Structure formats: C-alpha cells, structure tokens
Amino acid sequence: SIDIPVGAMRAYEFVADHLGDWAIHCHKSHHTMNAMGHDVPTFIGVNKKPLTQKIRQFQPEYMPMGTNGMGDMAKMEMPLPDNTIPMMTGWGPYGPIEMGGMFSVVKVRDGIDADDYSDPGWYENPPGEMAYEWTGELPEFASNNSPRTILTQKPASKG
C-alpha cells in the first residue's frame, strides 16, 4: 500500500517478476462521493424483483443495479448517474473490470524492453492456472462457533 494524499503524486518501483495483468486500485476517501460510495449493502446474487416493484410505486423509472456486480451498467452501455465521475469500469478479456474507482492495469510480460510502451494485449494464463466456476457437489459446510473449534475436513468416506 502507498498513501497518496489529495493533490499529491508518488513515484514507486516494484519488481515485476510475476507475469500477468495486475490492477493498481485506489481507495481514497474523496472518491466515496462518487462511484466508490458504498452506503448500501451489496446486492450481488439477491433477487430484487419484489423490492423493485415496491420502489417503482414511488419512482416508476427505478432500475435495480448490482445483482451481478456494478459491471451491469457497463454491459448495458448506460450513461453514468448524475454526479458520478466516469471511472466505474474498464473492459477486459472477459467483460467489464469492476473496480468502482480509479485503477490502472500493469501488464507484466517476459521480453518487454524498458522503453517499449506498446500494449502487449491481455495475459493468456497457462493451462490449468485459470479460475473457473465449480459446478460439482459442494463439501459439507463447516462452522466455527467456539474459539476452541479447529476446522478440519472430515475424512472422505468410501462406498
């Protein structure tokens, strides 16, 4: 983490020894008046249809957002709400990059010269190193309801 006060700049260096596309993201308090203002709990995965019907009785144009993350707005190519600085998202190889704030993508590759500022394109993950959605059976849920509880997986039963 690097603290950069309002109106200031920082120069920093890092060792770029991990290949990939890396986000540099900003969390400064003066951004909360814009797209990073999180006054409402996350609605990711929530069915907001009953709530939407009630709100539309008072505000007919109301449209819920955030069921799948704030990238919904970018996917629909909608204009940003009033008083929002256009820093909500960027586009990556799999759709919108949802940062909700100012960010840059640092692209670390082998063989890029120090003065080469051309875009190398999006990083291609080696086979077997890409995250994917698990669609198989989920393990039994474990909970920790005591400071003495140690969570360990039960041995797999055969048969």
Image: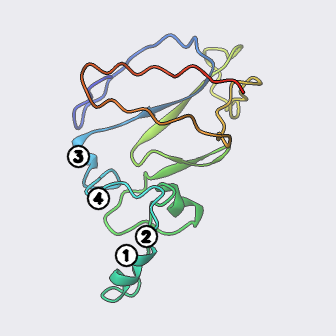
Which residue is disc 2 drawn over?
48
Give residue 73's position: percent from left, percent from top: 51, 63
Mark 2 neighbour density, 10 Å: few (under 14) some (14–19) many (20 or more): some
**Marks 1 and 2 close (CB-CB < 8 Å):** yes
- Identify the residue shown where x is 44% and y is 61%: 46
Examine the rendered structure and indicate whether residue 61 appears above or below residue 125: below
Q: What secondary structure is marked by label 3?
A: helix
Residue farthest right in this picture: 127
In the image, which disc is placed on residue 40?
4
- Identify the residue shown where x is 71% and y is 13%: 111
- First of labels 3, 1 by sequence position: 3
* Residue situated in front as seen by the camera: 32 or 131: 131
**Image quadrant containing the C terminus:** top right
Tell me the kind of residue under disc 3: His
Mark 4 neighbour density, 10 Å: few (under 14) some (14–19) many (20 or more): few
- First of labels 2, 3 by sequence position: 3
Report the Cα–Cα distance between label 3 and label 4: 18 Å
User: Which is in the foreground here, disc 3 or disc 4?
Assistant: 4
Residue farthest front in this picture: 159
Tell me the kind of residue under disc 2: Lys
Which residue is disc 3 drawn over?
30
Report the Cα–Cα distance between label 2 and label 4: 13 Å
* Residue situated in front as seen by the camera: 57 or 9: 57
Left or right: where does residue 135 sit relative to residue 80? right
